[in-house]
Image (cartoon, rainbow, N blue to C red):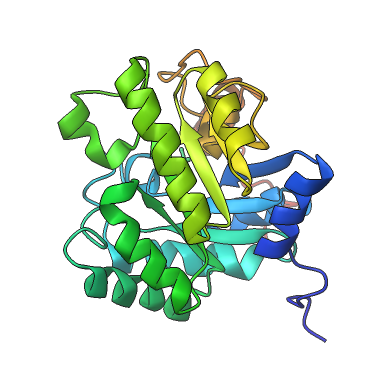
Amino acid sequence: MSVHTQTSRMTTAKIRQMKANGEKITMLTSYDFTLASLVDAAGTDIILVGDSASNVVCGNQYTLPITVDEMIFLTKGVVRAAHHALVVCDMPFGSYQISEEDAVRNAIRILKESGADAVKIEGGEEILPAIRHMIRVGVPVCGHLGLTPQSVNQFGGYGLRAKEVAEAEKLLHDAKLLDEAGCFCIVLEKIPAALAKQVTEAVSCPVIGIGAGNATDGQVLVLHDMLGMNTGFKPKFLRHFAQLAAPITSAVEDYIAAVKDGSFPSAEESY
Ligand code: KIV
């Protein structure tokens, strides 16, 4: 029997139930089979194939260039690794803003071709018709409010969002709309902890924070960031749960030295 059964795997209903039970929800990004296998085996509830792949995997400065085809390619490997976690695929920039119909077509394509369980989409009231339509046709949707990196050109950077009353009120309003529309969870990125608490208490769906304090129903981090693989990026909200950059560099240096001095491969490592 396949391990990918409805009973053993996370579902959006189970994620919702976790909020009701007061159980914290863990979400981490992954973009490939090998790391996703480790993240899944460790017991993570949700694996997000984030469009941060544009930065982490492709080396772009922004998330904007990554395409639906590239997101589907990466997500397929993660889905093969996920025996426990729910897999959520980010809808990339340009895949849902043009029209409601285009958004639904792309969301369905992502689910059909990648095998993801759900999509994540950035924005509030502006994209509500598309979100409603997706949910109506059976696409589970995770919302994303606060710092929405696809709007970096509008924001002019990656600073804290919703510090001012007007933006905080709009965010709370948007969160309620996403909740009413049926989003199974909402990611809140880089907003004041007090506002994230207010949103978490105001909506029925789980709220997952990144740089949003600890009153949310769960947390999400970019895997490569929390593993300390990217030493140049250390915002206040990020905790390094490992420091992998140094041991990886050191292993590669040892390999280079062993090849150069002829000690690798040894007789035991040869046929
Ligand atoms: O793309 C991503 O990795 C994300 C998380 C930071 C929430 O959207």
Asked if residue 82 lies left or right of residue 149, the reply is: right
Asked if residue 135 lies left or right of residue 20, the reply is: left
Q: Give above or below for 116 relative to 208.
A: below
- Residue 255 drawn at (x, y percent): 55, 36
Taking depth in this image into account, of 104 and 168 the one nearest to the observer is 168
- Residue 262 drawn at (x, y percent): 55, 38
- Quadrant where the image shows the N terminus: bottom right
Write the residue at 45% across / 81% down: 112
Write the residue at 33% across / 15% down: 164
Write the residue at 18% across / 24% down: 156
Q: Give above or below for 120 relative to 235.
A: below
* Rendered-image quarter of ligand 1: top left
Asked if residue 70 lies left or right of residue 155, the reply is: right
Taking depth in this image into account, of 26 and 261 the one nearest to the observer is 26
Taking depth in this image into account, of 247 and 238 the one nearest to the observer is 238
- Number of labels in the image equals 0
